[in-house]
Image: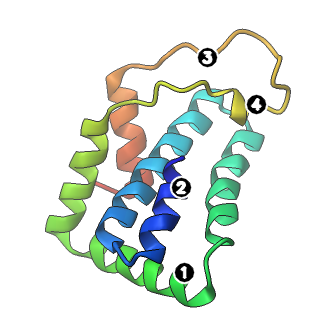
Amino acid sequence: MLYAEMNECVRAQKFDRAVFLYALAGSYTWFDANRIGTQYAKMAHGKRLGETLAQLSEKQVSQFWEHIRATMQDPGKKFMICDNVKQAGMPTHSIDYMRVDKSAGAPAKPREQYQWEMSVDNYLLCK
């Protein structure tokens, strides 16, 4: 849902909101992939973004990436994005979408807040 909303924002040229949604959705999938810890899950993280961006025109994707780069290269804006994503909190959805075998095993145990913040820091290069 976050990626779909991100695309709506890109189409409407609401790039600040789109960048936040990109950061939040990507941090969630990165965190989920790390919780599962498989190569498949890490590939699923990148695949979700790729499938979403494929729904936009080449020009829209180019404009969006330029806005992401500009935001992440500005220390003040980058700090705000990192802080806002962390404040949004850990995801509460099921992580089964990241599993190869959706019926396999018990669900992953929630990780500590520290692990959530480390995932955001690593994914968005906050520190």
Mark 1: give few (<14), some (14-19) or many (20+) Cα within 10 Å.
some
User: Which residue is located at x 54 percent, y 26 percent?
Assistant: 93
Residue 53: which numbered mark, if any?
A: none
Q: Amino acid at mark 3?
A: Ala
Disc 3: which residue: 108
Q: Position of residue 58 (x, y in %)?
A: 61, 87
Q: Is residue 87 above or below residue 104?
A: below
User: Which residue is located at x 38 percent, y 45 percent?
Assistant: 120
Q: Amino acid at mark 2?
A: Tyr
Quarter-wise, where is residue 101 in the image?
Answer: top right
Q: Is residue 50 above or below residue 80?
A: below
Q: Position of residue 39 (x, y in %)?
A: 74, 42
Q: Earlier in the sequence, mark 3 or mark 4?
A: 4
Q: Amino acid at mark 4?
A: Arg
Closest to the camera, between mark 4 and mark 2, is 2
- SS for dot 3: loop
Disc 2: which residue: 3
**Direction from residue 56 to residue 63 in the image, left or right:** left
- What's the distance in space between the residues labelled 4 and 2, CA to CA? 19 Å
Disc 4: which residue: 99
- What's the distance in space between the residues labelled 3 and 4, CA to CA? 11 Å
Mark 2: give few (<14), some (14-19) or many (20+) Cα within 10 Å.
many
Q: Earlier in the sequence, mark 3 or mark 2?
A: 2
